[in-house]
Image (spheres, rainbow, N blue to C red):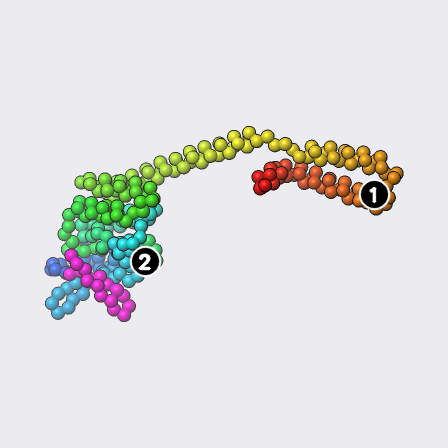
Amino acid sequence: MKPEYKRDFVNSYMILPKQKEIREDNFQIKMITQGIVPGLLTCKIGNDERESYYYYEISGKNNLKRLYEHKKLSCSKLKNLFLQVRDIYNRCHEHLLEEECLILDPEFIYLDIREFVIALVPYPEHIGNRQKELEQFAEFLLEIIDYEDEPAVELAYAFYEYAQQENFTWSSFLQYILQSCEKEKLVVEEEIKEECQVVVEEKEDVKVENPTSYLKAIIIVMILIAIISLPFLTYYAFLFEISIFALILFFYWFLKRQPYLYLILEEDE
């Protein structure tokens, strides 16, 4: 099935042929053309002299195949893709729209260019093998994932394995994703706990030698020298000695408040 494309002064459209005689008041057609189900491309039926067509508005969107022709898909975006597809299928069930009308083909999965928001194509005349579509979709994802992103590789291969199952459902696969996320969270929490424990043990092993003990000795010596030399000091020498003494007292007070400062200075050196 080869789509056609058309642009008017305002919007761009993807066009698929309307080959079956389906009344426009048909329930499925009304659901599709009235835009009741979020996550589906807006559709309207157009006619020319001989044939009728389904017009899907794709303004500001591009299909998955074209967007990732030269780009790679990360794990976070792959999860986002699966979640959005699952939600669209669930909404179709809620509105009694047959999921067989959804085309799960990269050429018919559209994304907003500005945001990673997916829209599927509802085509009432879609006739396809659902199982085969799933497998081909999984194979396509294996081609576009970032193989340097290990979680993305694991997730894409897990989806490929799930897609082989005849009783595949998006809800069951998303349950697998949630369980994987919980396991990853537990692993990360354990790693953080281990790192914190190592840091605590390293701090306990560090013997901090308080530099204020040296300053105490210097202050005592300075006081003794000042008392002994007081009768022999001139006025200016006395002021100088008082200034030195005040400076040492300041450093003593400062190091008392910042006992680990000298360790930081040593590390910088």
Contact between marks 1 and 2 (CB within 8 A): the answer is no
**Tag 2: amino acid:** Ile
Query: Which comes sooner in the sequence, label 1 or label 2?
Result: 2
Write the residue at 29% across / 47% down.
145
The front one of 214 and 117 is 214
Q: Can residue 24 be seen in this view?
A: no
The front one of 88 and 189 is 189
Q: Quadrant of residue 217?
A: top right
Residue 107, percent from left and from top:
22, 55
Write the residue at 28% across / 68% down.
10
Q: Is residue 172 magenta?
A: no
**Tag 1: amino acid:** Phe
- Please tell me how crowded label 1 is: few (under 14), some (14-19), or many (20+) other residues with Cα within 10 Å: some
Q: Quadrant of the N terminus?
A: bottom left
Element type at mark 1: helix
In this view, 59 is above or below 171: below
Q: In which quarter of the image is residue 17?
A: bottom left
Write the residue at 31% across / 53% down.
71
In this view, 93 is above or below 10: above
Element type at mark 2: loop
Q: Does the magenta stretch include residue 3?
A: yes
The front one of 240 and 154 is 240
Where is mark 1, residue-wise? 238
Residue 40, percent from left and from top:
25, 55
Where is mark 2, residue-wise? 113
Q: Give the range drawn in magenta.
A: 1-17
